[in-house]
Image (cartoon, helix red, strand yellow):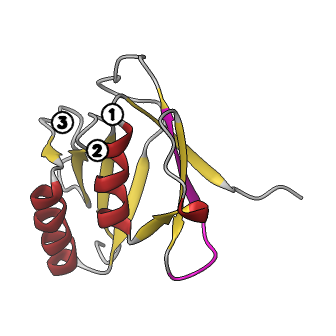
Amino acid sequence: MLTVGSLVLGVFDMARAVAFWTAALDYVPRGGLVEDDWTVLEPAAGPGVQLALGLSETPVQRHPRVHLDLYARDAADQAAEVERLLALGAKDVDWDLYPEDPDFVVLADPEGNVFCVIDTSHG
């Protein structure tokens, strides 16, 4: 049986990506190792899905086929997390595919990788 071990993001600047995602998710570099071309981050609190960062020169896609969904408890938690992530260096994305009543906010990390913050209480 397979399980998801890591999600992988391509990045241009490893140090900047590590700084953002460790603060955003309360993750730490696995084994304390941050390498120039590949770094695996894991939850500081214990086992969970890892986020691997790989050095890449591939341009960021406007509408990526794969992205992260980060879950918030409710609308207030979602708004607070969006503000926290923006303060860490995330950017608002002018998303042209929002439905009429979205339960998500689209942001991009400092590398331009798109991700969503989801209000899981949204009807």
Please state which of the two labelled residues, at mark 1 or mark 3, is closer to the viewer: 1
In the image, taking residue 120 as reference, residue 56 lies left or right, namely right
Q: Which residue is disc 3 drawn over?
A: 95
Residue type at mark 3 is Trp
SS under mark 1: loop
Q: Earlier in the sequence, mark 2 or mark 3?
A: 2
In this rendering, would 95 be left or right of 36? left
Q: Amino acid at mark 1?
A: Asp
Which residue shows up at 10% across the image and 60% down it? Answer: 87
* SS assignment at label 2: helix
Q: Residues within 10 Å of mark 2 (few under 14, many from 20)?
A: some
Viewer-nearest residue: 49 or 115: 49
x, y percent for residue 68? 43, 50
- Whether residue 56 is in magenta: the answer is no
Whole-angstrom CA distance, mark 1 to mark 3, is 24 Å
Q: Relative to 64, is 44 on the left or the right?
A: right
Residue for badge 1? 13
Instruction: Identify the amino acid type marked 2.
Output: Arg
Instruction: Inspect the magenta stretch and tell me whether residue 46 lies in it.
Output: yes
> What residue sits 54% from the left and 55% below the top?
33
Identify whether 118 is placed above or below 64: below
Q: What span is colored magenta in the figure?
A: 45-54
Q: Which residue is mark 2?
A: 16
Mark 1 or mark 3, earlier in chain: 1
